[in-house]
Amino acid sequence: MTQPLPRSLRERIGHALAFEVIAMLICAPALAWLMDKPLLHLGLLTATFSAVAMLWNMLFNDWFDRVQRRLGFERGFWVRVCHALLFEGGLVVMLVPLAAWWLSIDLLEALLLDIGLILFFLPYTLAFNWIYDVLRARWLARREAQAAAASCRGA
């Protein structure tokens, strides 16, 4: 079983930024339209959500990688589903109170809003991370092949 190479802090930041920027470009206009609120108001909320989520993304994925290395499991479909559920569950705990305060709504309304966001983010998280892992594996394989070719030329 092949274990993923540890990710550097730089890579984790890039991963989190890509995830959040793409999500913001989708969510801010969609929420502004659905809630009939100004794009700037919802844009600032999604940017704040993204900042919280980005930090959580880096911390959670570092923890998940450590658990994977310790337990030695592969990231098949069901592990990815569990990854997405655990990640989004942590965000619910952090973001529902923030949404209630920002939008001047009660916690139940904020929870319902968050459930709507989860319906978007669960498949988005699953797909983004799967695509990222596939592209990362290809990049690492290409880098390894280039290194091997360079060492053959140098030998």
Image (tube, rainbow, N blue to C red):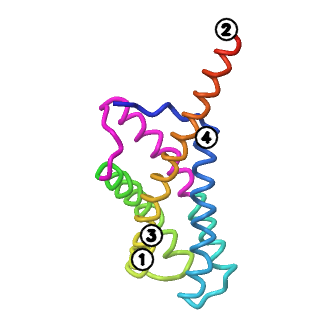
CA distance separating discs 1 and 4: 30 Å
Question: What's the residue at 56%, 64% (across, down)?
Answer: 49
Find out whether the residues at labels 3 and 2 contact each other: C-beta distance under 8 Å: no
Which badge, 4 or 3, is on the more N-terminal residue?
A: 4
In the rendered structure, the answer to whether residue 51 lies left or right of residue 129 reads right
Is 62 a magenta residue?
yes
Q: Quadrant of residue 92?
A: bottom left
Q: Identify the residue under disc 1.
A: 116
Which badge, 3 or 1, is on the more N-terminal residue?
A: 3
Q: Relative to 110, does residue 139 appear above or below in the rendering?
A: above
- Label 3 element class: helix
Q: Which residues are magenta?
A: 52-77
Question: What's the residue at 45%, 73% (across, down)?
Answer: 117
Q: Nearer the viewer, mark 3 or mark 1?
A: 1
Checking the image for residue 96, the label placed there is 3
Three-letter code for the amino acid on which mark 4 is drawn? Glu
